[in-house]
Amino acid sequence: MLFKSLVQSGLLVVAGLSEYASAASSASSSSSSSDSETIEVVGNKFYYANNGSQFYIRGIAYQASVSSQNTSFVDPLADGTTCKRDLPYLVGANTNVVRVYALDNTSDHSECMNMFKDAGIYVIADLAQPKVSITTDDPAWDIALYDRYTSVIDEMQQYDNTLGFFAGNEVITNSTNSDAAPFIKAAIRDMKKYMSDSGYRAIPIGYSANDDADTRVASAAYFNCGEEDEIADFYGINMYEWCGDSSFKTSGYQARTEEFSNLTIPIFFSEYGCNTVRPRKFTEIAEIFSDDMTDVWSGGIVYMYYEEANDYGLVSEIDSTSVKTLSDYVYYSSEMAKISPTIATSGSATATERGLSCPATGKTWSAADTLPPTPLASACDCMAASLSCVVADDVSSKDYGDLFGTVCGEIDCSGQVVFCFELVLRSSRQ
Ligand SMILES: *[C@@H]1O[C@H](CO)[C@@H](O)[C@H](O)[C@H]1NC(C)=O
Ligand SMILES: *[C@@H]1O[C@H](CO)[C@@H](O)[C@H](O)[C@H]1NC(C)=O
Ligand SMILES: *[C@@H]1O[C@H](CO)[C@@H](O)[C@H](O)[C@H]1NC(C)=O
Ligand SMILES: *[C@@H]1O[C@H](CO)[C@@H](O)[C@H](O)[C@H]1NC(C)=O
Ligand SMILES: *[C@@H]1O[C@H](CO)[C@@H](O)[C@H](O)[C@H]1NC(C)=O
C-alpha cells in the first residue's frame, strides 16, 4: 500500500508539521523549574506554586484602548521605557497583575516581563488581537486563530510571571449569540493540549465574559463543565455593578457570589470599576477582598490604567517617560493599600470533582456541548501523530491526491484534507 511505503522511507517533508516538531523539541530544554514563583490553580483558587500560599489578583488593565473598530494597537509589554515609567505607579497601587489585551507576537517582551517579575507583578494576556479573534457574529476556530494563539503562548510561556491567558473576551454578549461559546472552549482545549505537547508549563487559560443577566450563570457553568481536557482553568467576568457608594447586597455582588459559589475553578473580576459616579472612590475593593467574597472570588482587575475618552483611567499619559496620576488613582491605591484578605493554603484545598454538568440549552443558552474540531485536525493528525509524516522522494505529486485520499478516507477529515495536501505540495516544491 502506498501509504505504508511512504512511512517507511523516514523523511520529514511537511513544512507546516516540521515547525511543530521543532517547537516541541526546543520546548523540552526550557522545562519549568519547580522553585520558580509561578502561580497555579488548585480547586477554585490561585496559589503561589513555591509555598502554596493563596494568590489574589490585585490587577490593573494595562493597555491603551484596543477595539475591534481600530485594528492597530500598541503592545504595552514591548517597550521597556514605558514599563519602567509605569512600574512605580503599579507598585504604588499594590498591584500584582496586569491584564494586556493584545500582544505583538513579533516583539521581544523580556525587558518588561523581567522588570515586572522583579516587582512581583504577573501578566494575564488575551491571546487574540483585533484582527485575529473569535468574533461574536461569525465565530470560528480555525488555523489562523490557532497560529495566532500558539504564537503568543510560545512567546509568553518563557516567563514565570505569565499567570494566564484569555481565549476570548466578551465574545458571547447575550442570549442571541451563546452559540459562539463552543469555539472559545475548543480554543481552550487545543491550547491546553498545545502547551502539554510542547513541554511548556501548564499555564492557566480561561475566558473573560461580560456581565449579561441572561447568560452569565449558564456561561460560567459551560466553561466549568465537561471533561478535564476542555474545562477552562479559570473564569473572568467584566463586572460594573458597584457604582459609587454601594453595598454587598445593593450592588448585586451578593447575588453574583451566590450564583457562582458552586464553580470548581477560580472566578475573578476580569474588569471592574463602574464610573457613572466620579471620582471613583472604589469602596467595592474592601468588599471584594472581604470574607463575604473571598471563598468564591479571587480578586479583580480594575479597568484601567490609561485615561482615555471613556474616563476610566487612573493616570494620564504625558509622554513616554512621564504620566500624571488622577484622583481615581489616589482613591484606588489608598483602598488597595488597606486590604488584608484571608489567605488559604493549597494543601488544605479539598479535592472536588472539577467538571460540572453542562447547562441545559433553551431560550437563553444555545451552546452545544460538543466542541468544534482542532483546526489541524483529522487529516493532519493521521500524518502527524508521531511527527514523522513522510513522503518518499519517488512519489510524484500526482500521487498525493491518492495518498491523502487513501489515508484520510479512513477517518473523518472534516474538510481539512485540502489544507494538509497543500502543505505537502508546498514543501515538495522547496
Ligand atoms: C509565598 O511566596 C510568595 C512569592 O515568593 C510570597 O510573596 C509570599 O509572601 C509567600 N507566602 C508565605 C505565606 O510565605
Ligand atoms: C488606532 O490605534 C492606534 C494605536 O493605539 C492610534 O495611534 C490611532 O490614533 C488609533 N486611530 C483611531 C482612528 O482612533
Ligand atoms: C504571529 O501570528 C501570526 C498569526 O496571527 C502568524 O502567522 C505569525 O507566524 C506569528 N509570528 C510569529 C513570529 O510567531
Ligand atoms: C445581542 O448582542 C448583539 C451583539 O453584541 C447585539 O447586536 C444585539 O443587539 C444584542 N441583542 C439583544 C437582544 O440584546
Ligand atoms: C449554582 O447553584 C445555583 C443555586 O443552586 C444555581 O442556580 C446555579 O445554576 C449554579 N451555578 C452553576 C454555575 O452551576
Image (cartoon, rainbow, N blue to C red):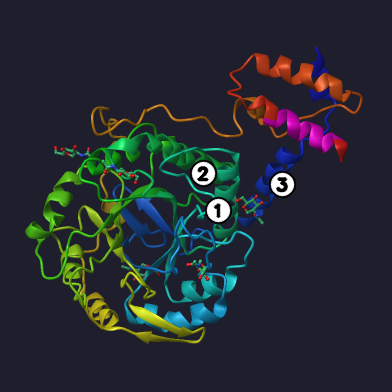
Do callouts 1 and 2 mark residues in contact (Cβ within 8 Å)? yes
Foreground of the two, 321 or 296: 321
Q: Disc 2 on helix, strand or loop? A: helix
Residue 155 drawn at (x, y percent): 59, 58
Q: Residue furthest right?
A: 394
The magenta segment is: 419-428
Q: Disc 3 marks which residue?
A: 22
| Callout 1: CB less than 8 Å from ligand 3 | no
| Magenta stretch: includes residue 279 | no
Residue located beneath label 1 in the image: 153
Real-space Cα distance between discs 3 and 1?
Answer: 15 Å
What type is the residue that disc 1 sits on?
Ile
* 374 vs 133, nearest the viewer: 133
Q: Looking at the magenta stretch, what is its main secondary structure?
A: helix
Q: Name the residue under label 2.
A: 191
Image quadrant where one finds the N terminus: top right
User: SS at mark 1?
Assistant: helix
Mark 3 residue element: helix
